[in-house]
Amino acid sequence: MTTQPFPPPAELTICFAHVAYQLETIFSRRQAALRVSGPAAEADIQSFQAWTPEDLSARLHEADVLLVSGFWQNEFLQVAPRLRFIQSIGAGVDQFDLDALRRRGIRLANASGVNSNAVSEHAMALILAFTRHIHTGRDRQQSRAWRGMIGDLALREDELGGKTLLIIGLGQIGSRLAKLARAFDMHVLATKRNPTAAAAAADSVHPPDQLPALLPQADFVALTCPLTPATEKVIDAGAFALMKESAYLINVARGRCVDEPAMLAALQSGAIAGAGIDHFWDEPLPQNSPFWDLENVLITPHTGGETCMYEENLIDILLENLGRLWRGESQLFNQVV
């Protein structure tokens, strides 16, 4: 394991690697603001942006710090002699060989919480869309069809007050979703590995093994948990069988938190009322997927975490961690390695 010191600001080069995010632009603007406001360590840092994996591979040898997510390949370590710190652009870090990073003395932090507002609001938007039939209104708009009033109560728009939301995973995203839901007078149940942590966010918090007893109570089931061995397919055929026929599934977690064939069967058979899905097993969702044709499904293309504030929030985390590294602190914000 290397013991080389972390480079000082004047000797540091940062590589921002993403296909769309304007990370270097935002970082440069933040540096300019720091210069105006007074002396700052970040003001003299050199940086460049890699827009493709090929760009990254060609220039990674220049970087001491790397901001990256989907572009990363563990083979890049062979062409990164200066690399000391990786700030993941996303919360997930399963693409990184953690043992290899440790051997090289390369620190790693994730971006957990960077889009907690966006994801929680996205989940709430899907809940509201189903409740107020926003999705069917948009469908009719495309065909210029004005819908008449509905006499059948089972088919009419509804209200959220008094409805029960079950949140699976009461972390930052789940806790904020709970706050939003309670503002709509919903009753909020949640599962969390440690029920005592963040317990005030929901009306009641339960350990994961109580999920079967909670599912029959829920009008909406929202997945906001990370993908782990314990949460993979946490919603399976057995879970769908326990849900109300009038209930909706909202998945803003990873696709593999749900048994996808079981979800398709439940939606097609009417075992549940519908699903708002932001993540699938295979992305982009294939054009021949039967999910596209289901009227009781709202699909968003893995955009739950997208926000105009993403770059700003990520740069906040980066600057915090650079400060800790310069000060020689052992613990990073959102530290992984």
Image (cartoon, grey):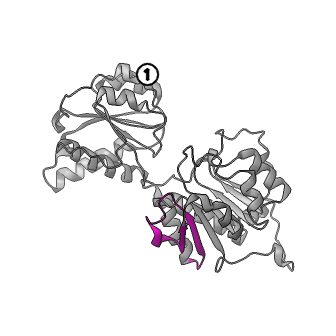
Tell me which residue sits at (43%, 30%) in the image: 97
Residue 324 in sight from this viewpoint: yes
* Near-viewer residue (51 or 199): 199
Q: Position of residue 231 (x, y in %)?
A: 59, 49
- Residue 322: horizontal and vertical position, in percent? 25, 44
Measuring 31% from the left and 32% from the top, which residue is drawn there? 106
Q: Is residue 327 left or right of residue 239?
A: left
Q: Amino acid at mark 1?
A: Glu
Q: Quadrant of residue 261?
A: top right
Return the residue found at the far left: 39
Number of disc labels: 1
Quarter holding residue 287: top right
Quadrant of the snapshot with the C terminus: top left
Residue 223 in view, yes or no: no
Q: Which residue is mark 1?
A: 75
User: Magenta stretch: residue 202 in it?
Assistant: yes
